[in-house]
């Protein structure tokens, strides 16, 4: 059997997909037990990206809609990115009962319901394995390999740019600004890095991961999202001394007794023995905890031409096998079900790392402990650091690790301590995720 | 649609499968978009294992063949283990055109060709995701998620018993014997641990992993297999000082320029930054390197009731979806192709760790370096350790890390050094796997 593919967007990832389909066709047919995937048409606004495809016998066009409306295309692969144009093309393809493969996490996070509804209505397959973690088969694992499990939590490092920056800050002792500049020089961060460093890209991915893991529609706005741009390298160093590493982590959990979802993206202290703690540089990893399988972690390259192409081609193979339309049945929850309740951010209970900067006076620690205790925040350990600029007027840093506390309680305690006369600077805090 | 299951063997794993199918049926149906899986019959020689199943309406029998020959069974799940009986049951099920799911790595490693041939002949599905690494979806990843890739290597920690023992030896500084006793006390090692500690279990798993990764029949006898029972805790400590951890690792690689397979199971030094180095205790992990995806690692529980059941149920879902029969097409290589050539063990090129025990005399190091050099073994670093029993007659340990060398050259050099008058004990060596 042969699946005929129309490719929209021949940039980095689209170019990788074209190379795989044109260069690996025979090998792919052998590996899949006889499935042929043929690139029949491609569109890009840059004609020079199309030259080599045209030479290889692919019909090329500047107009993506022309590729979508061809009769000889079974599957449309959308790699244009962004929201409006991509959405219109995908919906038109589905209206024509073509299957669709996309890596567009932004679109799925914001308009997942509409797209899934269109796919279900058309009886078409919708593949988006490459939308999260590049080439890592994490969505595949959630959909098939771990299908026997009720998922309790997903915890992931899903943004390579942030992980590169934090790795450089930790290992090199560099500031955030210097590490960002390095990431930009290496091509790991964009000139405008906001989408990555502010945590929005991770929030998009968490939205998709959580939907599949917990089988519920997830609104992007229900994800608490904090980025890494405000991080002080000092806290990374203190964390390290205490046996932790700081990572930007996306967390989705069923919260305690109520079946509410706790969805958060923020810089997080991970104990060094946590499976995610060793994930460095641009790598991604997601830890999934299921009621039967226990903890499973998948690790690999979360972005880039070849890794992302690998997952896109895997989706195409699944569609060719005819198993993807059934997989789309698995997405029915996205349109048929009310969203699960979301845990209000103040209710989320975690351990905290907090650095106070206070006057070096008798009784300060006692006052802080009393205030924390009054807000039901229990101290697990305290370390008073040497003043780091050798000047008493800058105050002394006191680092506290708490036991698990409600975020609202913890924030109230912090506000009260910050207002005390002995506080020289606002307290800086980070959440801790246990191993 | 509904898939009717006959279960052979209701021991630990079989009991877990029964619990999942009986207790999670409705949840499973929802998660899969409408697939029902019903346990209709089960067999075990221990009647008391069947009581609760019988009470739940499952037809039970002491005779496994009776379950296989039922007309209302679509899939036979074989969890009896061992070779002869299990094989006869599986072949009979396939002869009756029933699909088969098994976790029997031993059987697949030894008789894979015959079983795949029978499945292909019957047009039946054959699922064995649980045969390697318990609940970790590593075979799934090789078959589907990474299908776009030409696999260059697989490197795995696939035996939890050995990994537990080595973790205890590393962290606790205990001897092999003490760590084994601990593992037995914890239920992680059997009374007769030979299959695990001698590396045979890992070799079985590598046989299956390599077959799927490289798409070639692999004879169990083509795997070089060395166990951990001869390990001295001293070498784990020296390795640690040098920035390495020692793990029992299963390695499958396409060797250099020739398309030959290098298949080995042996205790291995992994640099601390290697993704597998942090895998401790009973956990398993497999790192797969594909030409597009780069490095991917999957990590999780490699054994036990619930994790293994998780993968078995995933196979059942895949069969119910009808995608598994196509997946069996992917196994055609197992019977249609000649095996890839195997790299002779002497030809495998790796770096080595070696500990010599020599007289504390002038010129010894020079002689050793000369002999190594004559055999084309190049020294990367040398550390002369303090004599560890404070007695010159025991000699001094000299630890050498080599650059990559052919195994045959290295062994020849070692033989020559061992024969020298200055050698007090035979050299102890371990291979190094680069990060």
Image (cartoon, coloured by chain):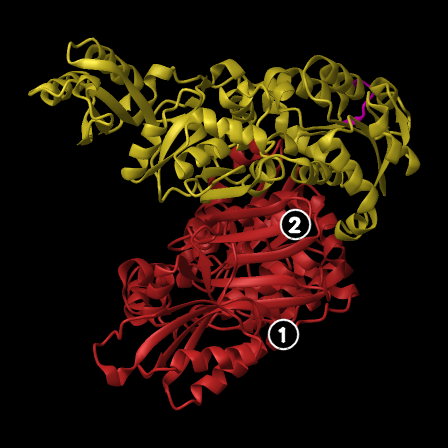
Chain colours: A yellow, B red
Mark sitting on residue B290: 2
Magenta span: chief secondary structure:
loop
Q: What element carries label 1?
A: helix
Picture residue at 59% right of the left edge, 57% below the top = B154
Q: What element carries label 2?
A: strand
- Highlighted magenta segment, given as a residue range: A95-99
Left or right: residue B297 compared with residue A73? left
Q: Is residue A133 magenta?
A: no
Tell me if I can see residue A235 in this picture. yes
Task: Identify the chain of the residue marked 1, using the numbered disc in the image.
Answer: B
Q: Does the magenta stretch include residue A97?
A: yes
Query: In which quadrant of the rendered image does the N terminus of chain A lie?
Result: top right
Is disc 1 in the same subunit as disc 2? yes
Seen from the viewer's position, the closer of residues B171 and B324 is B171
Task: Identify the chain of the residue marked 2, using the numbered disc in the image.
Answer: B
Picture residue at 72% right of the left edge, 32% below the top = A12
Determine whether label 1 and label 2 are within 8 Å by CB.
no
Residue B324 location, x and y as percent? 69, 48
Left or right: residue A283 compared with residue A123? left
Residue tagged by mark 1?
B347
Mark sitting on residue B193: none
């Amino acid at each position: 059997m042969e699946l005929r593919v129309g490719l929209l967007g021949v940039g980095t990832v689209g170019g990788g997909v074209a190379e795989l389909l044109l260069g690996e066709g025979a090998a792919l047919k052998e590996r899949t037990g006889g499935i042929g995937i043929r690139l029949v048409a491609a569109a890009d606004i840059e004609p020079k990206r199309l030259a080599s495809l045209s030479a290889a016998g692919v019909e090329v066009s500047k107009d993506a809609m022309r590729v979508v409306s061809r009769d000889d295309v079974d599957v449309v692969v959308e790699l244009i990115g962004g929201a409006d144009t991509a959405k219109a093309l995908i919906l038109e393809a589905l209206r024509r009962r073509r299957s669709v493969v996309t890596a567009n996490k932004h679109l799925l996070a914001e308009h997942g319901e509409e797209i899934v509804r269109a796919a279900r209505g058309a009886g078409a397959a919708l593949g988006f394995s490459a939308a999260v973690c590049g080439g890592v088969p994490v969505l595949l694992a959630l959909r098939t390999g771990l299908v026997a499990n009720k998922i309790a939590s997903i915890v992931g490092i899903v943004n390579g740019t942030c992980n590169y920056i934090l790795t450089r800050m930790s290992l090199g002792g560099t500031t955030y600004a210097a590490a960002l500049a390095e990431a930009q020089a290496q091509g790991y961060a964009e000139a405008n890095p906001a989408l990555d460093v502010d945590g929005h890209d991770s929030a998009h991915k968490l939205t998709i991961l959580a939907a599949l893991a917990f089988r519920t529609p997830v609104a992007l706005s229900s994800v608490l999202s904090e980025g890494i741009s405000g991080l002080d390298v000092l806290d990374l160093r203190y964390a390290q001394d205490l046996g932790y590493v700081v990572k930007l982590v996306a967390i989705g959990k069923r919260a305690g007794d109520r079946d509410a979802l706790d969805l958060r993206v923020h810089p997080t202290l991970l104990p060094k023995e946590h499976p995610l703690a060793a994930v460095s540089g641009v790598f991604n990893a997601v830890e999934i905890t299921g009621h039967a399988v226990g903890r499973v972690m998948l690790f690999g390259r979360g972005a880039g031409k070849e890794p992302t192409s690998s997952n896109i081609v895997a989706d195409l193979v699944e569609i060719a096998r005819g198993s993807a339309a059934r997989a789309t049945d698995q997405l029915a929850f996205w349109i048929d079900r009310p969203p699960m309740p979301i845990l209000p951010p103040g209710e989320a209970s975690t351990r905290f790392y907090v650095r106070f900067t206070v006057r070096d006076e008798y009784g300060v620690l006692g006052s802080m402990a009393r205030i924390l205790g009054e807000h039901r925040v229990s101290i697990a350990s305290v370390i008073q650091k040497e003043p780091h600029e050798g000047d008493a007027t800058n105050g002394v840093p006191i680092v506290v690790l708490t036991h698990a506390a409600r975020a609202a309680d913890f924030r109230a305690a912090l506000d009260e301590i910050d207002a005390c006369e002995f506080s020289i600077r606002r307290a800086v805090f980070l959440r801790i995720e246990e191993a």
